[in-house]
Amino acid sequence: DQQVKQNSPSLSVQEGRISILNCDYTNSMFDYFLWYKKYPAEGPTFLISISSIKDKNEDGRFTVFLNKSAKHLSLHIVPSQPGDSAVYFCAASVGGSARQLTFGSGTQLTVLP
Amino acid sequence: EADIYQTPRYLVIGTGKKITLECSQTMGHDKMYWYQQDPGMELHLIHYSYGVNSTEKGDLSSESTVSRIRTEHFPLTLESARPSHTSQYLCASSRGAGQPQHFGDGTRLSIL
């Protein structure tokens, strides 16, 4: 049973517009959430994280929103750039970032020039 | 940027062979992890280590074994490879609480 779900396998967005990637989780014990970006033939690269004590964290063009009551988080990329085209994985853990991560299956983002 | 290295990047080998996938990090991180990922699927944790001589199995059952004799080195071994072991194997490390896990570029393993 998947505890972290990314229900959209793919998303296409025009360059300059906002990309919104969504992630749902079922385990209420999760208290730390991360987003990773993965290019083909490379390992995942850490993007941004959020602790369950916050509902928003921003880093440049990337903002993560956490809605604990809905068990939902989203990643906003504004403005989207062609170099953002990659697979984005949502991950969650219990007890902090160094603990075991539970990953979603990823969303392929394509930013069209 | 994290310095974590995996070798080989690609390996195609016959059934029954013994395989060791190497993972090394130069950051002095205590915590290291092995994940397995099939195409289009989520990463699954198969092994982790919180320090030298400490290893634990992850959520996904795996026939592989690991060792952690040195902080910087966390090799994964398959004693007798089978086609069902065909997958991508990703190694990661972390400094600790509040710090994200950093990944290597993975080993894509194909067992014929």
Image (tube, rainbow, N blue to C red):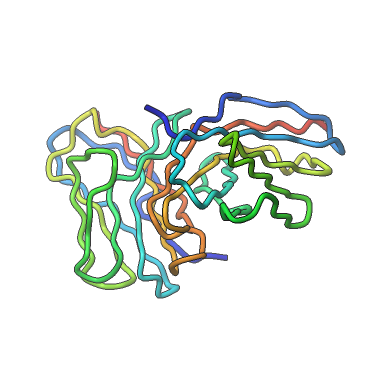
Q: Quadrant of residue A15?
A: top right
Q: Residue at x 57, y 43 (%)?
A: A38
Q: Nearer the viewer, residue B51 or A68?
A: A68
Q: Is residue B9 left or right of residue B17?
A: right
Q: Position of residue B2 (x, y in %)?
A: 52, 65
The image quarter in which residue A11 lies: top right
Q: Position of residue A18 (x, y in %)?
A: 81, 36
User: If the image is split into quadrants, where does the N terminus of chain B sit?
Assistant: bottom right
Residue pictured at 30% horizontal, 57% vertical: B22
Q: Is residue B46 left or right of residue B40?
A: left
Q: Tell me where residue A2 sits by quadrant.
A: top left
Q: Is residue B54 above or below residue A29?
A: below
Out of B105 and B17, give the one closest to the viewer. Answer: B105
In the foreground, A100 or B40 = A100
Residue lying at the far right in this picture: please name it.
A16
Q: Which residue lies most toward the bottom here?
A: B28
Q: Quadrant of the C terminus of chain B?
A: top left
Q: Residue B79: x and y, percent?
A: 13, 45
Query: Measuring 47% from the left and 33% from the top, which residue is drawn there?
Result: A26
